Amino acid sequence: MTDPVTAAAMARARELGWTALGRTSPNPAVGAVVLDAAGRVVGEGATAPPGGPHAEVAALAQAGERARGGTAVVTLEPCDHTGRTGPCSEALLAAGVARVVVAVPEPTGLAAGGAQRLRAAGVDVVTGVEQDAAEDGALAPWLLGVREQRPQVVWKVATTLDGRVAAADGTSRWITGPVARAQVHRLRATCDAVLVGSGTVLTDDPQLTVRDADGADADRQPLRVVLDRRGRVPAGARVHDGAARTHVSTAPDPGALLGELWDLDVRRVLLEGGPTLAAAFLSAGLVDEVVAHLAPQLLGAGPALVGDLGISTMAAALQLTPVDVTPLGRDVQLRFRPTRHTGGVMTPEETTD
């Protein structure tokens, strides 16, 4: 059983990982906490953008000599290879830590061996501490990429209580209130790319940037991705305003599109497209998380939140596992993970943008 001090440090390390998510790809978003010999927090760190220090190195730099004889608590096993930066295992040894506590063992052959090297040098290494919580946190996109060689897809949808994403006249501003809309910007900030179809661009002309409470653009922007097979998006659309990079794709299906994005070092995608694009990804089994913002409104008509999934019976329904429920002002955020994919594959004609 993990002692309270170490458990608190690991919880903080997971939080630090979340602060890095959206800035580290293709590297994992790792968090690290350094405790001195008395168990006091003396250093914290999170993975910097590629080429910058890893979480352990940042935490050790903050701790300085106070790390000697102490404990490093980290969400992912320290790397043992030299890439753009040196091995984290070497930095931990140089700092003189006596103990290293790891949540998730390194799953790749390239960076593995950190725990083994530390143990060989006499450091007490414990792995698998609160591993499930770490795997479900900021490391999830990277771990999925290791397993499946594709980005994680988070489908975000704003809907009325009766499942409408717009009124009968096509208007959708605003279904949700300001608190929920601010949460969308925080969610975008954790992603490498924001994806819509050309239909959404033509209907709503969204900017798809991350903005702060005052409406100013954030310093780091995700890649804007538009699926536009027929070249319908005009040059004057706001996705071409220069506020962020934009990638226009003509990919024939969701899997091919994710392959394009993987090659661009995208590891986490926020799917903000309309009902048809959402249905295409769901039918292909390529939605990993659902974030639904539910507004206390009824419309009675208008587009449904998802298009045809090819399901005709309750037994075939796509099942979702609830993750959490969060009030957002007058609205509610519901998070789910699909537990059963439909397994269907939609044709290019059906996955219209």
Image: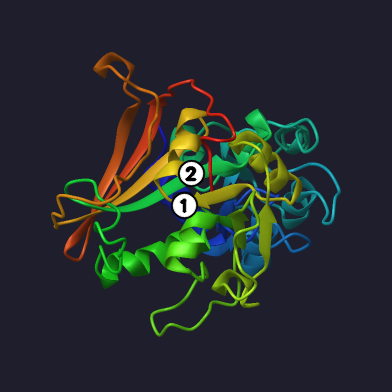
Q: Position of residue 230 (x, y in %)?
A: 64, 51
Q: CA distance from mark 1 to mark 2?
A: 6 Å
Left or right, 247 with respect to 336, comes to right
The answer to whether residue 130 shows anywhere in this view is no
Q: Which residue position is annotated with label 1?
A: 273
Write the residue at 39% across / 31% down.
338
The foreground one among 187 and 43 is: 187
- When the figure is inspected, residue 243 is found, relative to residue 124, above or below; the finding is below
The foreground one among 156 and 99 is: 156
Q: Secondary structure at mark 2?
A: helix
Q: Amino acid at mark 1?
A: Gly
Alpha-carbon neighbours of circle 1 within 10 Å: few (<14), some, or many (≥20)?
A: many
- When the figure is inspected, residue 346 is found, relative to residue 29, above or below; the finding is above
For the N terminus, the quadrant is: top left
Numbered disc total: 2
Q: Position of residue 61 (x, y in %)?
A: 68, 67
Q: Which residue position is annotated with label 2?
A: 277
